[in-house]
Amino acid sequence: MPEHTERGLVPAAALAQTGAAVRIGTGGRLTLSGAVPDTADWFAWAAGRLHGLRVEPVHGEADVAVRTGADLSEFASVAPATGVDPRPEPGADERHRLEVAQGRVLVSSAGAEGAFRGLTSLVQTLSVDADGNVWAPRGVVVDGPRYAWRSLSLDVVRHYFTPDEVRRVIDLMALYKFNALHLHLTDSEGWRLESRAWPELTRPGPDGVREYYTREEFAGLVAHAARCHVTVVPEVDLPGHTRWAFDAYPELAGGVEYPHPRLRYLHPGSEPARRFAGDVIAEFAEAAPGPFLHLGGDEPFGMGHEDYVEFVRLTHRLVREEGKRAVGWQETARAGALGADDVLQYWIGAPDEFDPEAVKRTVPEEFHPLVEQAAETFRISPGDVPAATERGVPVLLSPNSRLYLDRPYADGCADPAQEGDRDRLGLPAYPPITVQDSFAWDPAEAAREAAPGTVVAGVEAAIWGESLTGFGDLAFLLLPRLPGVAEKAWSQYRTGWEDHRGRLAGHEPLWEALGFDNHFRPAT
Ligand code: TNX
């Protein structure tokens, strides 16, 4: 790492250990001054968990000093983030300066947000030797995010993750400077947030197993995320993807006749369906303090265009009435409901790669009408982002060709014992890609390709649970690809694959320390 670096010289995630290391502490401990209590607690926790260090908050002289209230001109070489800020109190500056010299580390920032990010870079690059000396690469990094919204979408329906498991995911996200967690909480296979208004949604299964978050558990997740500077964006997926709700409450049909039992959706003409939407949107709005609520809207299979438009407009209005801004999957652009304060989530990156005939060969015949519907949604999808851009709706980039982490790996395995997992995990409907290919994209370019003039809200990776059977499977698909997404979302400097790969290699011990031990090890 060069002695002095400007924007662009040091990979923004600051993963490199290439500079001469200097000793910044001894005796397996670091003293820390100047950080607000939450940030100090987090740093102490992370340094302990990742490196076995003890961190002692002190006043005055310290191994690691945080200085807030810095003049923004100190960061003039780093552009402010662009895009939409997902936080409950938006606008805090995440830029910071991290200076590592012999026996001394100084993190300066405007406020707590920048200090948190600077300390995160430090904790990524620390090492401790057998004598308890603490080392870090010497140099100065002036850094800040490219996009204001950097997130992961986690499907907790197709595979349920316990609150402790979700907390582990949040810890990993914090290590890579993600700032939002989108929780996909409802779908045809379940409903994961306790409902008071419609309690049958979250009745325990026949074996008494409870696979949903109580209000208290969910509040605990939101609080843990907040301590990690991650904002929770809950999703209630309507009007499609609702078979679970129909199974619990057949009256949601409200007299509507469906041509196929697998193609049910909430119909705007059904009074119970409208009441249901109002109730569950209110419950989800109450559950998390962030400014955004995700209203779903993807794959409205079986639904006529006019009915879809009417229902999405209704849900958008309900989200607004709860005082929230809406995020909608890209299909919602077809309803023309979202405005410049909302966010459209672009996901159908490669419509051509969906081959309905190939998919039909992998699913039972009763699902074939669904496959046809999916093909239709993909066919018309290139019009979605242009329609949103015309209305000034910012776009969250989740092109499935790169950012769906449930896409199978194409790489060979360094460890042959992993071949079974590689072949089992990820949706067979997607062509597999290599880790290198998953890194080969640029957000601004992807946005331009989706529609000229697109306003980028930020970048979101997504992981869907259809192929998962446990936390180890999640770890396998998240790593090593998730840090590559973080790099694209955060870094203002365009790092190449070789550089990224080299830095990734040193991160395996960090993943293992956070409980992600079953990560994929590509052969190359
Ligand atoms: C499409 S992405 C879906 C999900 C699936 C996913 C599998 C989206 C908005 N809808 O319901 O789980 O593909 O990758």
Image: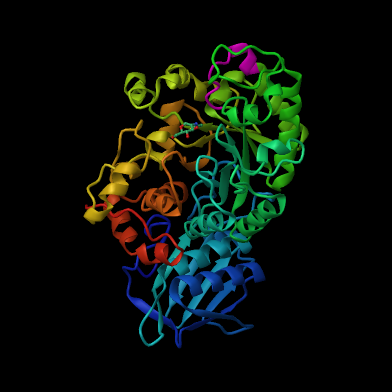
**Is there any visible trace of residue 302 in the rendered image?**
yes
Task: Give me the residue at 45% from left, 88% from top.
Answer: 27
Q: Position of residue 274 (x, y in %)?
A: 74, 23
Task: Give me the residue at 60% from left, 23% from top.
Answer: 391
The image shows a total of numbered marks equal to 0
**Is there any visible trace of residue 324 in the rendered image?**
no
Query: Foreground residue, 24 or 127?
Result: 127
Question: Colour scheme in the image?
Answer: rainbow
Query: Foreground residue, 200 or 423?
Result: 200
Q: Is residue 38 left or right of residue 521?
A: right
Magenta span of residues: 298-309
Q: Quadrant of residue 4?
A: bottom left
Q: Position of residue 92 (x, y in %)?
A: 64, 54
Task: Give me the residue at 51% from left, 69% from top.
Answer: 46
Query: Foreground residue, 350 or 114?
Result: 350
Q: Position of residue 287 (x, y in %)?
A: 71, 46
Is 307 contained in the magenta span?
A: yes
Q: Position of residue 233 (x, y in %)?
A: 62, 44
The quarter of the picture where the N terminus appears is bottom left
Vertical placement of 96 versus 185: above or below? below
Q: Is residue 225 left or right of residue 441?
A: right
Q: Quadrant of residue 376?
A: top left
Vertical placement of 9 versus 410: above or below? below
Is 14 contained in the magenta span?
A: no
